[in-house]
Amino acid sequence: MKFPTKAVHAGVEPDPSTGAIMTPIFQTSTYVQAAPGVHKGYEYSRTHNPTRSALQNALAALENGKHGLCFASGMASIDAVVKLLKPGDEVVSTNDLYGGTYRLFTKIFEPFGIKFNFVDMGDPANVAAAITPKTKLVWVETPTNPTLRIIDIAAIAKLTNGKDILLAVDNTFASPALQNPMDLGADIVMHSVTKFLGGHSDVVMGALVVNDDELAERLAFIQNSCGGTPGPQDCFLVLRGLKTLHLRMERHSSNGRAVAEWLAQHPKVGQVYWPGLKDHGNHEVAKRQMSDFGGMMSFTINGDKLEDATKFLSSCKLFTLAESLGGVESLMGHPASMTHASIPREVRLKSGVTDSLIRLSVGIEDAGDLIDDLKQALG
Ligand code: P1T
């Protein structure tokens, strides 16, 4: 089945009791048992909920995986992955990644005795050099947040597959419409569902997709034991969002191209980071592993002054200054003071998160209107 058909149908069956075409919001915490242990597969909603099950199945299908697991946020899903490890284990992670992930790794899990090694994964040789006998997880985010670096998933999978090392890929920026890490050798795909999957800036949620039955069982045990699960209403909203994912990603990508190409020729703009541009450092890898390049991009203003970035951000009228991304409306952010403020300045500067770096989440509005807004603000 092709992706658009899966986006509309995967995971969703008409409700057996009523024929409702949309999976109902099963707003219930518990389920009646005829006798102790005699039930219809549902006992308690932290463990299982039919609306969540439909969404988990849909997400697994969209990522070409077997098992989906939903969490109360993207962070809760990453937290569950790291809980597969034990003290003394090591993780190799990309050095350019969402600030909240960096914070979770260094501030929460490092004190528990897990060691994180952050490397530039633009060159897979750096990953090979960082792997030790204690490495149990390689954490990849591609495209990276916020500088849109591209990491060659298949090349990294060659280093981990067949060994006792899990390869996890945060696929939030691409969404399964543009990239399927499982097909390239990843063991775990992670999403901040809050972004393109939800698509309408009205839900916070995370998800994992895996193929291996035993790994799925271990993650489901963590999901149930730690309890960071989403409610059924949020699951319903995401099920609804998924049905237009392919259409939204097409428009995010075409608007992304129009905006990135326009920014790249503007005299006041320094660097533009969008993987679809031919001069992007890993454009060839992006072309190989993504079907299109999406609507996420970052750029700097010539001179790299914080006050220029601040002035630009307060001059836009259509692009809204806000955390988050991936909704139908265009958003912009200042990573150094917002999403990546938890990363020390010297660390973030090394990965290109400079003072004037501005991140755009290009929405699905008219591309000409979006460019007009950027034009007046840069002016
Ligand atoms: O916000 P939450 O749903 O918990 O997801 C965390 C997360 C994980 N991975 C990536 C790549 C992300 O971008 C995020 C969340 N990011 C933002 C809120 C942001 O504005 O970048």
Image (tube, helix red, strand yellow):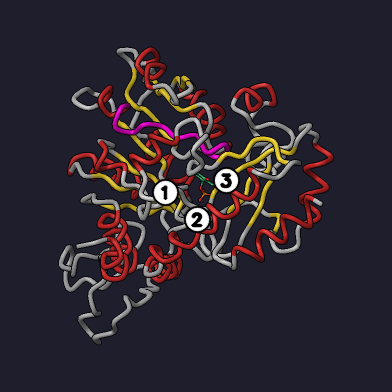
Q: What whole-number distance in Å separates the C-alpha atoms at marks 2 and 3?
A: 15 Å
Residue under label 2: 195
Q: Seen in the image, is 351 located left or right of residue 307?
A: left
Query: CB of residue at label 3: within 8 Å of ligand 1?
Result: no
Query: Which disc number belongs to residue 297?
Result: 3
> As shown in the figure, which amino acid type bears the numbered disc 2?
Lys
* The residue carrying mark 1 has its beta carbon less than 8 Å from ligand 1: yes
Give the residue type that dot 3 points to. Met
Q: Which residues are magenta?
A: 145-155
Q: Main secondary structure of the magenta part?
A: loop
| Callouts 1 and 2 close, C-beta under 8 Å | yes
**Residue 192 vs residue 318, the one in the foreground:** 318
Q: Nearer the viewer, mark 2 or mark 3?
A: 3
Crowdedness near tag 3: few (<14), some (14–19) or many (≥20) residues, C-alpha within 10 Å: many
Report which residue position mark 1 lands on.
191
From the viewer's side, name the closer residue of 224 and 94.
94
Is label 2 within 8 A of ligand 1 (CB to nearest ligand atom)? yes
State the residue in front, 25 or 357.
Answer: 357
Does dot 1 land on a helix, a strand or a loop? Answer: strand
Locate residue 56, reporting x and y percent: 30, 58
Q: Helix, strand or loop at disc 3?
A: strand
Inspect the magenta stretch and tell me whether residue 171 lies in it. Answer: no
Above or below residue 285? Residue 379 is: below
Classify 10 Å Cα crowding around label 2: few (below 14), some (14-19), many (20 and above): many
**Residue name at image x 41 percent, y 23 percent:** 92
Amino acid type, residue under disc 1 in the picture: His
Percent x, y of residue 61: 25, 57
